[in-house]
Image (tube, coloured by chain):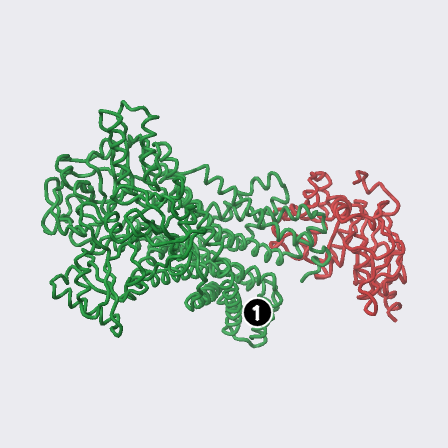
Chain colours: A red, B green
Amino acid sequence: MTTTDPSTRTGVAARAVDASKVYGTGEAVVRALNGITVTFDRRRYTAIMGPSGSGKSTLLHCLAGLDRVSSGRIFLGDVEISAASEKQLTLIRRDSIGFVFQSYNLIPTLTALENITLPMALAGRKPDPAWLDQVIDIVGLRDRLTHRPAELSGGQQQRVAVGRALASRPDVIFADEPTGNLDSRAGSEILTFMRQAVDDLGQTIVMVTHDPNAAGYADRVVFLTDGAIVDELAAPTADTVLDRMKRLGG
Amino acid sequence: MGRVTLQTLRAKKFRLLLTSLAVVLGVAFVSGTFVLTDTLGNVFDSLFVTATRGVDAVVRAREPFSASGPGTADTTRPPTPGSLVGLARSTPGVVAAQGNLLRYALVEGRGGKSIQNQAPAFGAAWYPPRGRVNEALDLVPSWRGARSTQPAGPNDVALDVKSAENGGYRIGDQVHVSFASAPPRTFRLTGVFRFGGSDEGLAGATLAAFTPATAEQELANPGQPPSWDEVDVRAAPGVSEIQVRDRLAAALHQAGVQTRYESITGAQLATEQSGNVKSNLSFFNTFLLIFALVALFVGAFIIYNTFSITVAQRTQELGLLRALGASGRQVMASVAAEAFVVGAFSSILGLALGILLVTPLRGLLSAFGISLPTGPVQIEARTIIVALLVGTGVTLVSSLAPARRASRVSPVAAIRDQALPASSGRRRYWWGAAFCAVGILALFDGLFGNATASQAAVTIGAAAGLVFIGVAMVSPLVARPVVSLLSAPARQFHRVTGTLAEQNAIRNPRRTASTAAALMIGLALVSLIAIFGASTKASFASAIDNQTRADFILSPQKFLPFSPGAAQAVRDGFAAASKQPATVVETRNGEIEVTGVPHAVLGLSSDFQQVADVPVRDFDRAAFARGGVLIWEGVAGTHECGLDQRAVCEPGSTLLVRFPQAGTVPLRVAGVVTNRNALPVSTNYTVSLAGWEQRFPQTLDAFVVIRKPSDVSTAQATRIVDRAAQRFGGIKAENKAQFKASELAQFNQTLGLMYVLLLFAVIIALIGIVNTLALSIHERTREIGLLRAVGMTRVQLRRMIRDEAVIVAVFGSLLGLVIGIGFGGAIVQSLHDQGIALTVPVGQLVVFLILAGLAGLLAGWIPARRAGRLDVLHAIDAE
């Protein structure tokens, strides 16, 4: 898609314009997203927060091309993915997006290294060896590369997932509760890697979380309630996030 | 627990359908076979009831001994002399007695066209309706606008409706008829009759009726006074069948001939004759049932596999049931109950499908040259019971091991997200190896032991079953390296999708192995047949090419032996054309008894070595030509020779041979046959044709092998031979190359039929692949979602699944090929002394492998499409 090094680019990585997502019809209609307009800048680490049912995961899925909005538009860089075909979406996900899910991130039959390079293998591309080296060092998996997921701890598995998300140098990495299944030590490790990815490698990360500590690693927090953005916080800490959540909840 | 079972079944309709299909097809095959055989049996029952209509009792000769092989009933029964008609008439309680016979009489259509199919061509005596005993035949009043009358003079004939129609005859037409010994001649068609009031009643046979005097004369056995097959007797009113039979028996006793002649009731005769035909048909039944059993066996693997997978997938659910208080026994019972419902459901469906299958099955057989008569479909209680028992039984037994495994799920499994602990693999492998070993021992016992042919067949079948199960149990051990080898092209051409397909195929070696096992069985049998067929064909071709020097061969058009008059006509034709004699060797098949054991015997003209390389040790040609016997090396020197147990068979000794009519005759052993490859049948005893007519009631030729005199041109010789064949009808006249080609074509047809019947098993195996893949994909839903999320396209996903299907299919086929080559090689080796040498049709086997791969591709198509339609987001969120 693009050969520009994302670390040298600035501007908007992804945005949603008046995006709505409606499930069901008539009486049973549910508005998961209700006309959201939001922008995510490049080289920034953004956390999306909100109570369950607020639409934060739906927003992430729509931004990442896993789900489609009912109305409104979604852009990845300059590309309007809300208008892309299923096939184009797949290629966009493969070439321009990195994913970290809460759990079950890895293909059990592939080694750690194979998992990391999977999107590139699917694209039939060779990974850039220097970049791959850098990524492997950041997630600290050099001695685990030939292991299969079953031989790795939960924290290590998530590190492989982060490695995979970084390896193809995507335009944006979307992370859906990446630490939700981890103990606090392994969790903060992952969050540190992601922070490094933004600071040192110039990556862009959008992360859904319900954990104020996790959000504290971000550059900015967006708060959602009932499918709409209700608040924002720049340069958050765990305490300021918790404080804001209490206010919103109350 | 019952509710849980039903809910599970209802929730998984697609799976239930696929699993059922494996059983449905097998059961359909079994029940279709039974229905077909019963339908045919019914046709013949009513045929023979009709054939003996009006007959209260018959007097006939006793069979001196029963013949050895199938299809030989009544072949040893001597004729009944005309004097017994008088004896029967003068017996009290008898109002009428008439001689009856049914002998070879081939009717040609107008212009020499053949109207015969595989059913026999008969001639019989026509008695005027008034006062006749047998009432099977009814004259139709008119035929194509002309009055139909009964044959009244020596040149008159009447035909059955079907023959008159197929022959294109009108009343008054000349009809050409060939006989067993009397020269062929033409008759005038005076009438057309129905058999038992039906146009189809004769089950394909043709029947020509003559006046009793003409019938006696033309249909008689050569060299013997005219005689009947039996004497039909009508009892006086008030005298029962049994009474008249017993009075006839008393009369025979009084006349002092009760050891040679007997009396039975008309009903007994009908039952006996129908039974004879049905016992010939039972060969078909067995033949088809073997293939049906193979299909069921393959189905059993699928059931086992499906239940194993679903039990593994439901570990958590089963654990929950245990945690809520269900006992291991209850869990096991719930799985067994599921199997029972699936089995019963499939059996009922299979039975229904089987009944529908009768017509296509008959069509299939007739497409391969086996035409069978039609009749009302017979569904007997036995068929229903067998279908239900077999279908339910196979399903239950196959689910037993998975059900046991389910019962061992611990309650903790409900909260632990992990699959069942694998049962001790090592023990399983030992068992598998033991099965293989016992199977191979059984194979060798069956092939090289002293069992009878049918015992050996059962042993070999059991051996194959054991080896299949054994290999299926052991094959997970080799799955990893073999699959990795087979995946090389997938990895090469499909890169990461190929690698993922390979990884998926060996992720659970046991599952892959048992899925592959189903196809393995099909391919093993297919390649066994291919090897056996190729070896037999190559050996036959080489025997024809290298061991015979025939210019022409006369052979039957439809498997039925023909009049020896044809051979004589060839001799006469060459005698008129040349001063040098032609060599015309006739071969005939008969039945004899040696030391109380029935044997097939080959009748052969004494100059057979002129046309075929049949090496004979210590050959006393003169003794053979005078009526001696040649013995096969295999019985030479054994104590099988003669009634004297101490006598050893060797050239010059005397063999006591019991002929059906001539009684026990001492025959001089005129030589020892050391290689019988060039003979048409592999008999232990070969009798020269000199005196054959006196010793056998049946004198038809099976083959006639001809060498022309050197001064007759090929073109002229061809004319002579063709003319002789045409004159008698029902005969193919071919040169050596043509004969070889048409025999091989016939053989190929039989092989083709077996391949088609095995297709059933292969289709079931492919359903197994579809089923396993569908279940595996269900299990891997989240993984597929993830792959799609990180950028696998639909095309790539479908390719990955199809690749896996191909890898599994080729893996199973390869195992099957190895087993098939082993079994085929062993079987061919055991036939070595029948002149069959091993030929491995490498090209054909490679084609089978490729076809199996393509079939795998096809089997992968459906699950691949289903997987491609998965919604990415739902897949990722799937539990």
- Residue that numbered label 1 is attached to: B318
A40 or B316, which is in the foreground? Answer: B316
**Residue at position x 89%, y 53% from top?**
A17
> Which quadrant of the view contains residue B830?
top left
In the image, taking residue B421 as reference, residue B552 lies left or right, namely left
Percent x, y of residue B42: 39, 62
For disc 1, the chain is B
Q: Position of residue A40 (x, y in %)?
A: 86, 51
Q: Secondary structure at mark 1?
A: helix
Residue found 55% across the figure and 44% down from its top: B854
Compared to B516, does B494 lie above or below? above
Q: Quadrant of the C terminus of chain B?
A: bottom right
User: Which amino acid type corresponds to the residue marked 1 in the rendered image?
Assistant: Leu
Q: Position of residue B50 (x, y in %)?
A: 35, 62
Q: Would residue B235 be seen by someone viewing this image from the given angle?
A: yes
| Vertical order, B66 against A94 (above or below) | below
